[in-house]
Amino acid sequence: MADDQKDKARDDTSEKVILGRITGVYGVKGWIKVFSYTDPMEAIVDYSPWFIRAENRSRSPWRQVKLKAGKRHAKTVVAKLEHCNNRDEAMAYVGTEIAIEQQQLEQLKEANEFYWRDLIGLRVINQQEIELGVVKSLMETGANDVLVVVSEADGEAIERLIPWTMDIAIITVDIEQGMITVDWDADF
């Protein structure tokens, strides 16, 4: 990144939420391609400032950058960062994660609405109080989202896919207790 940039290095005292990553450059005027985890994907450009750091470098400091413009372009999102004026400068951002501060997230309005990030790591038990594992991730499918729950038995990892259907497969979610109760057979 250019030496004359005014991007500020930030400490990690506030929790960051990763919303995407920079995957490439777009054109010759300093635009970047963004892979967005937001839904809809272009919602990532509604947040500013962004904080960036090299992917998979959890010990690297976050750097604050200001978003000048952004939009959906075909099947991706493109964005223009302040002080990024040509292809070479944009290239320096490729391979970085994009985050925002947690307090920048919109407050959820419904009782049974959750950010995926808040579900990862929660214990999952069924109605018979048998522990099924821990939420490793979530994935989108055509019909509904799916919890990926991982446990270990006899030294082998067991992965369960549980549909995110409130009041059907998902009975309760208690973020404070770190637990999700499901209507799911332990043998599935």
Image (cartoon, rainbow, N blue to C red):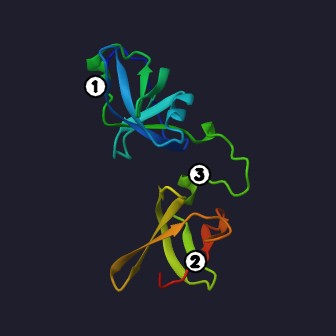
**Mark 1 secondary-structure assignment:** helix
**Disc on the earlier residue, 2 or 1:** 1
Tell me the CA gap for discs 2 and 1. 46 Å
Task: Please identify the residue farthest to the front as the structure is shown.
Answer: 142
Marks 1/3 in contact by CB < 8 Å: the verdict is no
**Left or right of 63, for residue 88:** left
CA separation in Å, label 2 and label 3: 20 Å
Task: Find disc 3 in the rendering and name its residue.
Answer: 115
On residue 125, the disc is 2
Report the front residue among 92 and 27: 27
Relative to 107, 153 lies left or right: left
Q: Amino acid at mark 2?
A: Ile
Q: Residue at x 63, y 39 (%)?
A: 103
Q: Mark 1 = which residue?
A: 91
The quadrant where residue 94 appears: top left
Does 113 appear above or below 12? Answer: below
In which quarter of the view is residue 154 placed? bottom left
Q: Of callouts 1 and 3, which one flags the residue occurring earlier in the amino acid sequence?
A: 1
Tell me which residue sits at (38%, 17%) in the image. Answer: 5
Is residue 168 positioned above or below 90 on the image?
below
- In this rendering, the answer to whether 82 lies above or below 134 is above
Q: Classify mark 2: residues with Cα within 10 Å, few (<14), some (14-19) or many (20+).
A: many
Q: Position of residue 102 (x, y in %)?
A: 58, 42
Q: Nearer the viewer, residue 178 or 170?
A: 170
What residue type is disc 3 on? Tyr
Q: Is residue 66 visible?
A: no
